[in-house]
C-alpha cells in the first residue's frame, strides 16, 4: 500500500522498523506513528508495554480486545492500556495515527 495518504513532511520522518509500514515521530514520553496497513492485514494477539491510542484517517480497523471486536472508521479514536492484549485486522487499505505513550 502506498503511504501517500500522509503529507510530504510526514513522509520525510524516519521509518518505523516493525511489522507494518509507518513514519515515526519521537517526542519525549510518546512516539507518534503514521501507519498504513494494506487490505487483508491481520495482526495476531499481542501486547505493548505502552499505553496506545489512535485515530483512523483512511479505511477501517477491526480491533479485538477483552474478547470483543469493535470496528473503527475514519475519525474514530481507540485506546488500549499498557499490556492489554489485543489483535487487529484490516479489510480495507487503512491509515491511522498512533500514539504510543511510554
Image (cartoon, grey):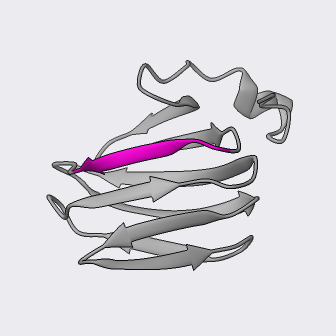
Residue 27: percent from the left, percent from the top?
40, 41
Q: Which stretch is magenta?
A: 40-46
Tell me the residue at 69%/73% (across/down). Answer: 73
Residue 83: percent from the left, percent from the top?
14, 58
Choose between 64 and 47: the one closer to the eye: 64
Question: Does 54 appear above or below 42?
Answer: below
Question: Does 1 appear above or below 97?
Answer: above
Secondary structure that dominates the magenta span = strand
Residue 40: percent from the left, percent from the top?
64, 44
Question: Does 66 appear above or below 17?
Answer: below
Choose between 63 and 30: the one closer to the eye: 63
- In the displayed structure image, the side of residue 28 where residue 3 appears, left or right: right
- In the displayed structure image, the side of residue 21 where residue 66 appears, left or right: left
Tell me the residue at 70%/44% (across/down). Answer: 39
Work out whether residue 2 can be spotted. yes
- In the displayed structure image, the side of residue 38 where residue 58 appears, left or right: right
Residue 82: percent from the left, percent from the top?
18, 61
Amino acid at each position: 500500500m502506498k503511504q501517500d495518504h500522509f503529507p510530504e513532511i510526514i513522509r520525510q520522518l524516519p521509518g518505523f522498523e516493525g511489522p507494518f509500514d509507518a513514519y515515526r515521530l519521537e517526542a519525549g514520553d510518546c512516539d507518534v506513528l503514521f501507519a498504513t496497513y494494506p487490505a487483508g492485514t491481520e495482526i495476531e494477539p499481542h501486547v505493548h508495554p505502552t499505553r496506545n491510542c489512535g485515530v483512523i484517517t483512511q479505511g477501517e480497523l477491526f480491533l479485538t480486545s477483552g474478547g470483543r471486536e469493535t470496528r473503527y472508521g475514519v475519525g474514530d479514536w481507540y485506546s488500549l492500556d499498557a499490556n492489554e492484549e489485543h489483535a487487529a485486522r484490516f479489510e480495507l487499505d487503512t491509515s491511522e495515527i498512533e500514539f504510543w505513550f511510554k
